Amino acid sequence: MLKKGSKLYSILTGTCPKCHEESMYLEKNPYKLNDLYKMHRTCSHCHTEYFIEPSFFYGAMYVSYGLTVAIGVAIFVIANVILGLTVKTTFVSIIIGIIALMPVTARLARNIYINMFISFDKNWKQNS
């Protein structure tokens, strides 16, 4: 079970990296594609600014690339090595899997990236 105070909690739930009290996103469902990247400007609890500098989340593209490669490798291992599917079927499986998981990957990349710069602060109420 994930506990507040860990980076993994903030990354997997999409909550504020400093207080873990609210979602950073206006819409929690990443498959509502029109709202995929819409975020609050600041946390309403601890007032942490999510956009640390202009174009801050462009750096998340590098994280997204790594996640996408990892997903592709995982699908390859499952489809080709474990299930024994043909190379052609495995390739199609990888493409479908990457496209289907794109919204989740995009959000996870942003969550990972912002958690590289902002850490949980259990005393955030006292510091406000």
Image (spheres, rainbow, N blue to C red):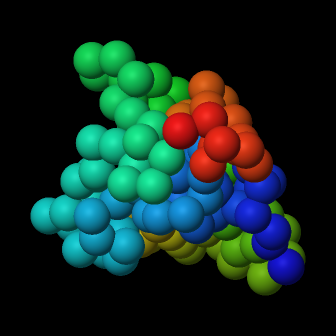
Q: Nearer the viewer, residue 112 or 19?
A: 19
Q: Is 69 placed above or below 14 here? A: above
**On the rendered image, what quadrant is the N terminus found in?**
bottom right
Q: Is 122 on the left or on the right of 47, as rendered?
A: right
Residue 11: image x %, image y %?
A: 63, 54
Residue 17: image x %, image y %?
A: 59, 46
Q: Nearer the viewer, residue 89 or 37?
A: 37
Residue 48: image x %, image y %?
A: 45, 38
Residue at 81% over, 69% down: 3
Residue at 28% over, 42% down: 41
Residue 13: image x %, image y %?
A: 58, 67
Q: Is 6 placed above or below 83 here? A: above
Residue 13 visible in the snapshot: yes
Q: Nearer the viewer, residue 7 or 41?
A: 41
Residue 71 visible in the snapshot: no
Q: Is 9 placed above or below 49 here? A: below
Residue at 61% over, 48% down: 125
Residue at 62% over, 35% down: 127
Q: Nearer the viewer, residue 68 or 57?
A: 57
Q: Is 106 on the left or on the right of 78, as rendered?
A: left
Q: Is 37 on the left or on the right of 62, as rendered?
A: left
Q: Is 5 placed above or below 3 here? A: above
Q: Residue reaching furthest left? A: 34
Q: Residue reaching furthest top? A: 53
Task: Kindly indicate the quadrant of the structure image that contains residue 10.
Answer: bottom right
Total count of labels? 0
